[in-house]
Image: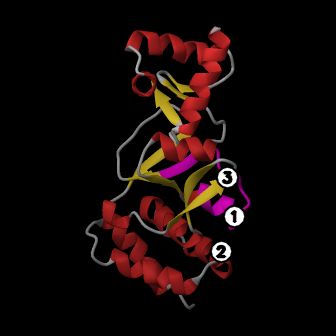
Amino acid sequence: MLRQTLYEIKEKAINSNQKVFSIADLSTLLGKSMNASGVYFNRLIKKGLAYKIKNGLLSFVKDDKIIATNLVQPSYISLNSALYYHSIIDQIPQTYEIVSTRQVKYNTRYKYYKINPKLLFGYNKEKTGESYFFIADPEKALLDLIYFFGFSPTFYKNIKNKLDIKKLKSYLKLYKSIMGYRAKRVLQLGDYIGK
């Protein structure tokens, strides 16, 4: 009876369109107490019906891209992770790099970078199987990389032929109203476009 109940819980969770669950989320979903939901939480993981992300969080999908952008919202995969996904660079990133408007530190393979809410643009919803994730287009991934780590003329020259320069120029205009040294770093790219 318990096994069937766990399968029913998994199906209900998957049908809810939520991809990452805490014990409190399970409690709300199931209409059960926190204690009962904690027991279900542990049994789902133990039976292999769910995957533990970290203490107190599980997912019913094993796709890192889906988990990364559902763990913290709003967020999207960016920086080197997005550039690799779009085949702009060949080096496989060690962690998933995600941009969000929230400051988050998880001891997981996902690294979150906080960005000004006015700069939350340039990403798309990508469907994968029965779910989805959010990922920056190549031009925004480059701008996010510059925003957080600085501008490298050599890096830009190596990838510029793979980018939509018109889109890059339109994105650059959006940084002009943002204050701070990071936005100024991004605006340096304007001097190199067209060279």
Q: Give the amino acid type for the residue marked by disc 2 in the picture.
A: Ile
Instruction: Report the quarter where the N terminus lies.
Output: top right
Task: Say if 152 sits above or below 46 in the image.
Answer: below
Tell me which amino acid carries mark 1. Answer: Ile
Q: CA distance from mark 3 to mark 1?
A: 22 Å
Q: In front: mark 2 or mark 3?
A: 3
Does the image show residue 182?
yes
> Where 48 sits versus 60, above or below?
above
The answer to whether marks 2 and 3 mark residues whose Cβ atoms lie closer than 8 Å is: no
Which residue shows up at 53% across the image and 87% down it?
Answer: 166
Q: Look at mark 2 in the image and give the residue it sits on.
A: 159
Where residue 131 appears, as percent x and y from the top left, is 61, 48
Residue depicted at x 66% and y 23%: 49
Residue 145 to residue 114: above or below: below
Q: Residue 173: image x %, image y %?
A: 37, 82
In the picture, the quarter occupied by the C terminus is: bottom right
Q: Which residue is mark 3?
A: 128
Residue range of the region highlighted in magenta in the rendering: 81-98
Of callouts 1 and 2, the N-terminal one: 1
Instruction: Say what secondary structure mark 2 lies in.
Output: helix
| Mark 1 to mark 2 CA distance (whole Å) | 8 Å
Foreground tag (3 vs 1): 3
Percent x, y of residue 8: 61, 23
Contact, mark 1 vs mark 2 (Cβ under 8 Å): yes
In the picture, the disc for residue 89 is: 1
